[in-house]
Image: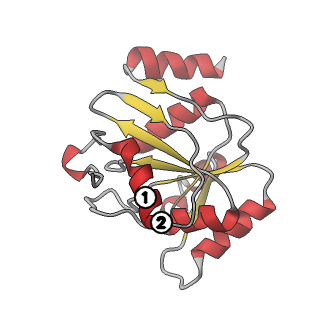
Amino acid sequence: MKKDIYKLIFNKLMGWKITGTIDADIKKCIIIVAPHTSWHDFYVGLFTRGIVGLEMNFVAKKELFKFPFGGYFRWMGGAPLNRQQNENKVDAYAKVFESKEVFRLAIAPEGTRKKVTEWKTGFYYIALKANVPIIPVAFDFGKKEVTIAQPFYPTGNIESDFKILEQNYIGVVGKIPENSFVPKK
């Protein structure tokens, strides 16, 4: 019933579509979502998660987890990230993967909504350390389409692997087009 409501709003009223899906048998993974250019990405992600129907988690700056919205973000699968602490975040996230039976972590590889020319590398090293696949997801506001690609298992050759992963984002336009990530060809 809830899934039908999500589809009605997202597909019919908003005009978006979802191409691809995440195999429910993949219980642990890193979902990289790009381009991340606006707060509008959050509700596109919520609708996508509701339609796909799988538990998905995210991290966000700790300031979002304060009153009045903190409880809501935690309930939605969020976890606060303290960007000031000098802790090894890769190891911390790998431990979370170890401790959970199901953990599908959605991350924006740009690490910000501002224009970037290169992705951050944390998601990649978390996937390697936790031994989980990376699933590329593109939010294309130009086409009003969410594209979910096939799982990618990192090899340890980050340069080569990034070239492969970035191919999923060629021509994809974010809500704020000038901030969209443009993959190297």
Specify whether residue 175 is in view: yes
Q: Find residue 38 and report its horizontal and vertical position in percent.
A: 33, 48
Q: Nearer the viewer, residue 57 or 33?
A: 33
Left or right? Give the position of 174 relative to 47. left
Left or right? Give the position of 113 relative to 82. left
Which amino acid is tagged 1? Phe
Q: Quadrant of residue 117?
A: bottom left
Residue at the disc numbered 2: 158
Q: Looking at the image, is 25 positioned above or below residue 154? A: above
Question: Disc number at residue 162?
Answer: 1
Left or right? Give the position of 100 relative to 116. right
Q: Looking at the image, is 136 positioned above or below residue 128? A: above
Left or right? Give the position of 131 relative to 155. right
* Label 2 secondary element: helix
Q: Nearer the viewer, residue 91 or 154?
A: 154
Q: Find residue 100 and report its horizontal and vertical position in percent.
A: 78, 56
For the N terminus, give its image quadrant: top right
Which amino acid is tagged 2? Ile
Mark 1 near mark 2, Cβ–Cβ under 8 Å?
yes
Residue visible at 75% across and 49% down in the picture? 102
Q: Find residue 160 and report its horizontal and vertical position in percent.
A: 44, 60
Q: Estimate the spatial distance between the alpha carbons at disc 1 and disc 2, rounded to whole Å.
A: 6 Å
* Label 1 secondary element: helix
